[in-house]
Amino acid sequence: MLEIPRVDPRAGLRCETSSAATASAEPPRPGSFEVLAQEGDARAGRLWTAHGPIDTPCFMPVGTYGAVKGLDPDDLREVGSQIILGNSYHLGHRPGSARVAGLGGLHRMIGWDRPILTDSGGFQVFSLRGLQKIDDGGVDYQTHFDGSRHRMTPESVLRTQAALGSDICMILDHCPPGDASPALMRVAVERSTRWARQACDLRPQILAPSQLCFGIVQGGTDLALRREHLAELATLPFDGLALGGLSVGEPIPQMHATLAEIAPLMPPERPRYVMGIGTPYDLLAAVRSGVDMFDCVMPSRHARNGQLFTFAGRLNIRQSRFRDDPSPPDPDCRCRACRLHSRAYLRHLHEQNDPLYGRLATIHNLYFFHQWVGALRAALRAGHFAATDALFSSIITDFYLTKPEPVSKRPRAPTLAATPG
Ligand SMILES: [Zn+2]
């Protein structure tokens, strides 16, 4: 039977980092990034922020409104989350960035003392089909909250994130739909480059010196356009670079090919982030291509839909065969849900629409994702990622690639009705 090296995401991370932190009197300055191990394009590293280090490769849970649905900070620490995501579009309107600042910033408001990355909100605004109008200076839009009209610019998204107190701020970029024409892709890239330059000019006046700022490379699956945009952004003083506009409906092999081609070209001395992916198999492909950071709503959204990730495949807890099953969701998992509860109980809670189901299922799925990425990180640090790669692939391919979900079911740009997180 195939086995992968198991990593308990609750242990180790902070031990490794705390010893690094206490080794010197002063922790490295925010933005410091060190590659600790590399095999091929894949690498393990450590990024420092004002709220401590992030060991990479790293999966980042999504807490759009300032909460990973149903989980409190203790839950997040227990499952092994090093950093969480918030969204400036949502938080900027509800409860409002000024209100968050008045409450002491996002960290204090939500009781989370580890790093927070916030997206600019541009992706959400561009998804407001029919409710937004873009020009070279920014985007006019109507919110999906109450229809009120606003304007988002390269400056406004930095001001929102400054008020939130984010550790890592994302710039405004033009994210076209996955099926956009080549002409629109080029317009989006050129506009995104101009906005990136504006963000770099404005940053010293708006963001605190301890807040990091990442640029975003667009270009869809047009590799030449991606290379061109990457070359432009690599010359700008961003602390890290992200790949945006992936997993927006393009075929999976095409997305992986784009990762494999573009990620290794990103500046090696800075962290690399792929936005909005993905499945456990996507994460493996991204790590193999040299990506350091990822985020996705998949663990929490699938949990709420009854889908539990295990190393023996995905389990649909709604199925009636689990009604009398006393075994834990995953017998090998050490998360709280699996240590304390049975499949039968989780199914019962799901049937009753009890909020406890969503919390336990999300705890399990996030634990799985952190364990998976932790195993890849551990293999890299131990110097046997390449040797284990085939094993990793076979495990994940068996359960997550040979029976892929239809593209239409994969995570896509959010719609007005979509519930984030
Ligand atoms: Zn579990």
Image (cartoon, rainbow, N blue to C red):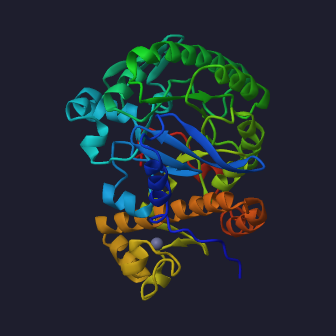
Of residue 329 and residue 204, the one placed in the foreground of this image is 204
Q: Position of residue 361 (x, y in %)?
A: 41, 67
The reply, left or right, for residue 385 in relation to residue 122 is: right
The reply, left or right, for residue 251 in relation to residue 25 is: right
Residue positioned 79% across, 27% down in the render: 224
The reply, left or right, for residue 270 in relation to residue 147 is: right
Residue positioned 59% across, 51% down in the render: 57
Determine whether 28 is above or below 298 in the image: above
Determine whether 2 is above or below 169 in the image: below
Q: Position of residue 75 (x, y in %)?
A: 35, 61
Of residue 343 and residue 156, the one placed in the foreground of this image is 156
Q: Is residue 153 visible?
A: no
Q: Position of residue 408 (x, y in %)?
A: 61, 49
Residue 276 falls in image quadrant: top right
Residue positioned 71% across, 77% down in the render: 2
Counting the numbered discs, the total is: 0
Determine whether 275 is above or below 142 in the image: below
Q: Is residue 31 visible?
A: yes
Q: Position of residue 333 (x, y in %)?
A: 50, 75
Of residue 239 and residue 143, the one placed in the foreground of this image is 239
The reply, left or right, for residue 145 in relation to residue 57 is: left
Specify the quadrant that holds the N terminus: bottom right
